[in-house]
Image (cartoon, helix red, strand yellow):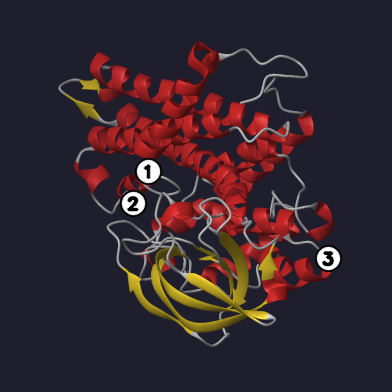
Amino acid sequence: MDFTISPELDKLRLRVRDFIAGEVLPLEDSKDSYNEFENIRLSLLKPLREKARKEGLWAPQMPKERGGLGLGVAEWAVFYEEAARSIFGPVVLNCQAPDDGNMSVLNKALASDEMKDKWLQPIIDGDVRSSFVMTEPAPGSGSDPGGMMLTSAERKNDRYIISGRKWYISGAAVASHFILMARTSDDPRNGLSAFLFHKDDPGWRIVRRIGNMGPDEHGGVCELEFDGLEIPMANRLMEEGDGLRLTQMRLGPARLTHCMRWLGMAKRCMEIANDYVSKREAFGSKLVERESIQIMMGDVAAAIQTGKLLTMHAAWLIDQGDKAQREVSMAKIHVADTLHQAADTALQLMGAKGYSEDSVVEWIYRYARCARLVDGASEVHKMVLSRHYQKRGNDFWDWPVDGGGDS
């Protein structure tokens, strides 16, 4: 494994850094830049996205022939980390959740160029937003969609009739294209299927937008009700019964892109905190000169580097064709904790300023708490790791061998 990046990728990284510093970061300081859900106002977003496209900094995960940059997964990490130096950066460069994961899975799962033109290309172009519809109110599906999903898709002639309820669906309030998971049989492994529907299709509604303790992505998280939504067979993704497989195809890389963005945000917290303690004086010396402050900063610096290595290792494995399930879980657990540690440390070092809205640190601090929940709670990922260990014993920590050694 060699995580050395090419000169071309390094140039791209620096171009992202310059764009974020010059075009995006300054917007964070003005309350006029934010909408009522504490994200960038859409009226500001559109011209920034146009600038990003002109600069060749758009949709890094998508193929070049569809307007993206055609980067590999390990290369995403370099790009995403720089994009997330600003809380607005990923959405400006079209590498934000949930569109990021939705674009990636649609690019893999859609069988024809015609379907990609209809359902994928508008998301790549930034003309529409998308949503992944899986989680349900109890006793429905959460961390165990295969065994607990209640939303049904009943087949009638050439279409499916959808009935059920979903909630905490990211981006639903602004999405036009939806990927829906529903039960088509009682088979524990092959009982789910995936479907596409459009916001204007009848037979469903948004019940409410659910308030959160933290800032909201565009479209928030919503509760949805399905009461007779009709989906043509042509809008089924993959084969009937392949829904769990599609979910796994989507969530593995999506968890990792969360880690990539969170590392950028954690570095931003360190950057802000370091600037503060380097200037702030108390009791005759600058804060940065104190051993206790240096220990706190050093802990975070080491945690970020560990997170980078875990993330890059998982990304490298995915690029080799491996599912990297255990590696993604390890990265997800560690980087989620690291983001919270970085935000909490920065807030503590900055005192009242860190707690106030004068600094973006308090925004990141509130956002960071969801990191241990989204795309699988940390405890679930620890269970995944335990199952891998029980199966493999000391070979859990195997050495990769050229041409062999799976995960």
Dot 3 alpha-carbon crowd within 10 angstroms: few under 14, some 14 to 19, many 20 or more: few
In the depicted structure, whether residue 142 falls above or below residue 193: above
Amino acid type for the residue under numbered disc 2: Trp
Tag 2 residue: 363
In the depicted structure, whether residue 87 falls above or below residue 218: above
Q: Nearer the viewer, residue 107 or 344?
A: 107
Q: Residue at x 51, y 52 (%)?
A: 188
**In screen coordinates, is 375 left or right of 177?**
left
* Label 3 or label 2, whichever comes before in sequence order: 3
Amino acid type for the residue under numbered disc 3: Asp
* Image location (x, y in percent) of residue 80: 59, 43
Q: CA distance from mark 2 to mark 1?
A: 21 Å
Callout 1: SS: loop
Tag 3 residue: 113
* Image location (x, y in percent) of residue 88: 50, 55
**In screen coordinates, is 215 left or right of 305?**
left
* Image location (x, y in percent) of residue 392: 52, 18
Amino acid type for the residue under numbered disc 1: Ala
**In screen coordinates, is 50 left or right of 152?**
right
Tag 1 residue: 377
* Label 1 or label 3, whichever comes before in sequence order: 3
Q: Nearer the viewer, residue 152 or 21?
A: 152
In the depicted structure, whether residue 266 falls above or below residue 232: above
Q: Residue at x 36, y 34 (%)?
A: 337
Residue 327 placement: quadrant = top right
Q: Name the image quarter holding the C terminus.
A: top right
Q: CA distance from mark 3 to mark 2?
A: 41 Å
